[in-house]
Image (cartoon, rainbow, N blue to C red):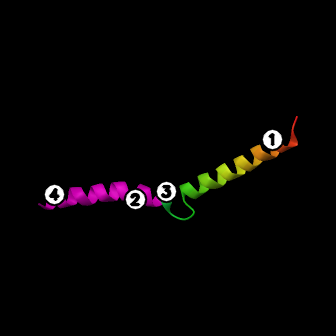
Amino acid sequence: MIRLLALGVLFVLGVGTPVLIYTSPGGTLDVMKQKAAVTGQAQQNRFQQGP
């Protein structure tokens, strides 16, 4: 029974930790959103300048 409980805790930690790191404020998701916004704005600026 203890082995099963330990395996369950290990699984929850193994799945939960990366999810929390990814979605935490200032985490990977926020960085990617900021980079996407900067890239999108640069593209809009290029389109507005014209040929």
| Mark number displayed over residue 47 | 1
Q: Quadrant of the C terminus?
A: top right
4, above or below 44, in the image? below
The amino acid marked with disc number 4 is: Arg
User: Could you tell me which residue is drawn at 11 percent across and 60 percent down?
Assistant: 1
Residue projecting furthest to the top: 51
The amino acid marked with disc number 3 is: Tyr
Nearer the camera: disc 3 or disc 4: 3
Is disc 4 in contact with disc 2, using a CB cutoff of under 8 Å? no
**Separation of marks 3 and 4 at Cα, in angstroms:** 29 Å
Direction from residue 40 to residue 2 in the image, left or right: left
User: Could you tell me which residue is drawn at 23 percent across and 58 percent down?
Assistant: 8
**Separation of marks 1 and 4 at Cα, in angstroms:** 60 Å
Instruction: Please state which of residues 22 and 37 is positioned toward the viewer in this rendering.
Output: 37
Q: Which residue corresponds to mark 2?
A: 17
8, above or below 50, in the image? below
The region drawn magenta spans: 1-21
